[in-house]
Image (cartoon, rainbow, N blue to C red):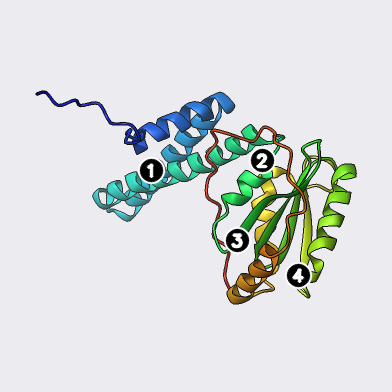
């Protein structure tokens, strides 16, 4: 009896790394036609510079492999940065965009989505990390101020003396653009140890949920790139 070569349900093959790169490159080209030429120019420039160094020092055959590796590395770094920027643009303005970015952060961060919100799909997310508690809002300033104030008041007793920051994400004056959110949080001071972060999370988890967020569209099909690891003291 012939065996079927088709993958069974739940065991479908995932695209290989080369296919993933091609897919991202296609999306990047659609988002910014100048992106891929910049990637190739960066790689080619690195290749030429390293080879010229080899010519100057008289070790060309040694520097050729080094030039190829350096060009590939620089090209991938630039490609990744431009892809990340394009992904941010794709989800900017969508409800839940800030949550998608927060959940992609690397390090000792705990993200609780939509701890507060309203019918306009304005929402507040809670982030716990070494800086303390960070409340991140999505929505116009005149509507999210009340949400932030109420949530800060609700968790103040559980947070005790831990600093509570509030960050408004958006394009209005005084707000943080979605593509700069990770960088902004990384710059906050490290006020807590890892053990204190765990204790704080336990206290906040014991709080009753303020409300159920109304269901709405959330960014789908966008895999957020990993952010840089925070520097630990």
Q: Secondary structure at mark 4?
A: helix
Mark number for residue 72? 1
Residue at 85%, 62% (x, y): give it.
153
Residue 151 in the image: x percent, y percent? 81, 57
Instruction: Mark yes or no: residue 130 visible.
Output: no
Mark number for residue 165? none
User: Could you tell which of marks 4 and 3 lies nearer the N-terminus?
Assistant: 3
Q: Which residue is mark 3?
A: 109
User: Could you tell which of marks 1 and 2 lies nearer the N-terminus?
Assistant: 1
Residue at 49%, 39% (x, y): give it.
79
Label 4 and label 3: CA atoms lie apart by 18 Å
Does 110 sit above or below residue 13?
Answer: below
Q: Secondary structure at mark 3?
A: loop
Q: Quadrant of the N terminus?
A: top left
- For marks 4 and 3, give the one nearer the viewer: 4
User: Could you tell which of marks 4 and 2 lies nearer the N-terminus?
Assistant: 2
């Amino acid at each position: 009896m012939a065996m079927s070569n088709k993958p069974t349900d739940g065991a479908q093959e995932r695209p290989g790394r080369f296919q993933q790169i091609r897919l991202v490159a296609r999306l990047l080209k659609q988002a910014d036609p100048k992106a891929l030429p910049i990637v190739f120019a960066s790689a080619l420039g690195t290749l030429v510079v390293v080879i010229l160094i080899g010519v100057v020092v008289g070790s060309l055959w040694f520097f050729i492999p080094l030039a190829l590796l350096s060009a590939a590395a620089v090209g991938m770094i630039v490609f990744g940065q431009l892809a990340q920027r394009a992904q941010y643009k794709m989800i900017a303005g969508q409800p839940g965009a800030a949550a998608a970015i927060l959940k992609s952060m690397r390090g000792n961060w705990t993200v609780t989505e939509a701890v507060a919100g309203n019918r306009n799909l304005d929402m507040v997310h809670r982030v716990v990390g070494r800086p303390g508690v960070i409340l991140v809002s999505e929505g116009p300033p005149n509507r999210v101020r009340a949400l932030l104030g109420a949530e800060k008041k609700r968790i103040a007793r559980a947070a005790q003396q831990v600093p509570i920051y509030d960050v408004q994400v958006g394009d209005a004056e005084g707000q943080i653009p979605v593509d700069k959110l990770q960088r902004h949080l990384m710059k906050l001071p490290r006020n807590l140890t890892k053990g204190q972060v765990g204790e704080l999370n336990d206290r906040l988890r014991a709080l009753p949920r303020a409300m159920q967020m109304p269901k709405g569209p959330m960014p789908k099909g966008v895999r957020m790139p990993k952010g840089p690891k925070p520097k630990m003291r």
